[in-house]
Amino acid sequence: MQNYQEQERFREEDVEQEVNIREYFIILLKRKLIVLTLLVVIFLVTVIKTFSTTPIYTSDTDVLIERNNSSSALERQYYSYDPDFLETQSAIIKSAKVARRVVDSLKLSTTYRSFFLEAKKDTPSFFANIETGLKDFIEKLISPLKSEVNSETNQDGERSGLNAEPLSDEEKISSMVQGRLSVEPVKNTKIVRIAYSDKSPIIAKLVADAVAKAYMEEILDMKLTTSRYALQWMTSKAQDERKKLEASEMAMQNYMRANDLVTVENKLAISPQRLSEFSSQLSKAQTDRKVLEGVLKQIDAAGKNVFQLENIPIFAGNEVLKSLREAIFKSRQNISELSKKYGEKHPVMIKANGELGELINQQQAEINRVIATTRNSYELAKSQEKYLDEMLTSTKSELLNLNEKFIQYSIMKRDVDANRVVYESLTSSIKKEGVTEQSQSINVWVIKNAFLPGAPSKPNKKRNLALGLILGLAAGIGCAFLVEYLDNTIKSEKELESRYGLTVLGAVEKLKEKGKNIESYIVQKPLSPLAESYRLIRSGLLLSSADHPPRTMLVTSMGPGEGKTSTTINIARVLSQGGKKVLIIDCDLRRPRVHSVFAMQNDKGLSNYLTGNLSENIIHKVAGEEIFVITSGSIPPNPSDLVGSKKLRLLIEKMSENFDFVLIDSPPVQSVTDSLTLTQLVDGTVVVVKAGVTTYETMQSGLKKLKDVQCHFLGFVLNGLPPSHAKGAYYSGYTAYYAKDNVS
């Protein structure tokens, strides 16, 4: 189900697009005269302009332009990539200086003067006169706005202004050369194409070649001028920098002498090493002092106890004490063995005890010596620690003082080095600039010389004619749609239905045959498409009411000349073709016309009847037709009063009983109020709208008036539809079908 709905939606969109395209095509058909007129005019102007324009010949030369790779490193750094390089060189090629060099080198102001300045004396063409006139007019308009009067020039190449001086021939020709010169870089290459256009092919070739040569000379001249200026500037700058360098060197020398900084760098290299050594020695001295202090505390704690003293590492590791301990141990063993044999007073025992006492004394003496040595080492470690601490503090202070002096020294040395670098760079640049003064920073090669053109480059006849045709067609189509957009008249049935929501009974095509009367045309050609359109209107009227067809109908329009009378008569004729009796009442008491169509007398009619001045029968029968007519009669002084009278109402009611259909032709709605009154006396109202005449504003205003009186609308009749608008599906169908019968 969803796919079906999507298909229906796509089909509706296609139909709508097809309708829009067909409407555009119809607009073009309707406005074809505008389209064809603009197309022909623009194309003819293009043809005349193209074939009357003086042929212009163009010759070109190709020049390869690139930077000189031998330039300085500074230039390569800043100019290695320059996307606008070729555009800049192109601007130089088109400059006034290059043009003046061309004029001087080729002697254009003397030898070839006639090719530039004499040509203006020729008789100007029609288009040239128009162009000159337009330029003069524009010049007059903008002349009050010009403020820089001294730099302005007029059309003859002369300066304009309060202090104006005439241009020389060289200046005039230089300006012409600039205007005719074109320079274009070839894409993705370093090649620039120089082209020159002139009426003479020889001049075109000569100038194109001369421009390339003049450009080379101008580049070299620019380089030389720049080099001279650079040398002057750098020489002056080098002298200033030399003075600054000498002053900074003298200031640094004085500072070094005043602060004894001859060996400052060596001192700065040695002082940190000494500071590190002192710090390391101080740490070692502090460690040694603490170790000795701990040993002394152990000795003091042991007191005279030899056994505890021997357990202290400094005594335990002493080799002398070790040997004494062994000797004492052996002596005691010996005494123990002798005591088994001898008594205490035996000489042997006395000698052995004496030897043991001697050993003990030696041991005590060695212990005392070690204690004294340890105390001396401790005192020495304390004094050494103090000395190293003092040396470390002194070294730190000296190093800080040296750092401050070296910082100032470095600042001054940096100034000296910077001044020396600038001075040496300027000196080197001066020498290099002097050596390379005659070289170019840009290399130029002519890779293709200018040729002698064999055919003109302008005008391009085929292109101009094609553009003229396209432009004319586009202008014609655009103008057609513009006119259509600005046209606020009703043009189609679709507009009527969509804008006002009322039924369109039918559309009547504008009669194309000259000398034919539309009121009698359907009688003469009953099978014509025009007759068929009125039959369609008849069908719409008969089906406009649900119960029965309207018997009394008012036919009116918004303005005069929209075809309400002819529509009334033709509707009456198609209604009478079914054997019905139809009565036409001409209620237009101001500008009646029904009687003239049927060639009837109008001295006695409706107005005479309504005023009571006539007792005769006012109904006239049309010969050969079942159509009856009540003419308007004499034009009364008060038509509105007669139309609003009760007698007219009674007349219409009576006629509706005697005739099958009663059609009332009334004045236009916008002119008078008669039609508004008559709408109350009939079953329905038919509004005739003339295509291309009735405007939206008029229609809106008229419909409002009719709706205010509660008019019953039967529908619209679109009259005078152009053939191009009458090509709808149905209309074209029956047009083709009835064409065979219409031939006769």
Image (tube, rainbow, N blue to C red):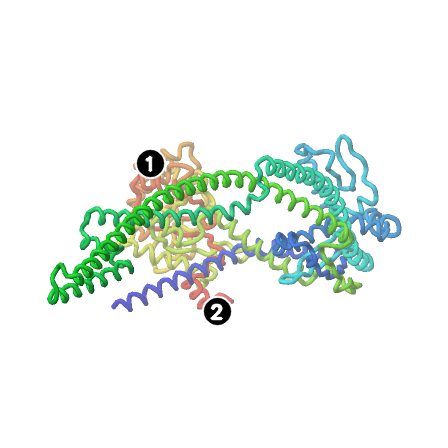
From the viewer's side, name the closer residue of 214 and 35.
Answer: 214
Q: Residue at x 38, y 45 (%)?
A: 384
For mark 2, give the secondary structure. Answer: helix
Q: Could you say which is closer to the camera, residue 502 or residue 641?
A: 502
Instruction: Give the residue drawn at x 64%, y 56%.
Output: 40
Q: Which residue is mark 2?
A: 740
Q: Position of residue 532 (x, y in %)?
A: 41, 61
Spot the residue most to the right.
111
Where in the figure is residue 66, as x and y percent of width and height?
69, 59
Query: Local crowd at mark 1 within 10 Å, few (<14), some, or many (≥20)?
Result: some
Image x and y of residue 313, in percent: 25, 56
Say which amino acid is labelled 2.
Lys
Q: Is residue 467 left or right of residue 688?
A: right
For the residue pair 672 and 576, the one nearer the viewer reads as 672
Q: Quick check: 6 above or below 88?
A: below
Question: Residue beneath label 1, please?
Answer: 644
The extreme top residue here reads 162
Horizontally, residue 92 falls left or right of residue 30, namely right
Which amino acid type corresponds to the residue marked 1 in the rendered image?
Answer: Gly
Could you say whether the residue bearing mark 1 is in a helix, strand or loop? Answer: loop
Residue 397 in view here: yes
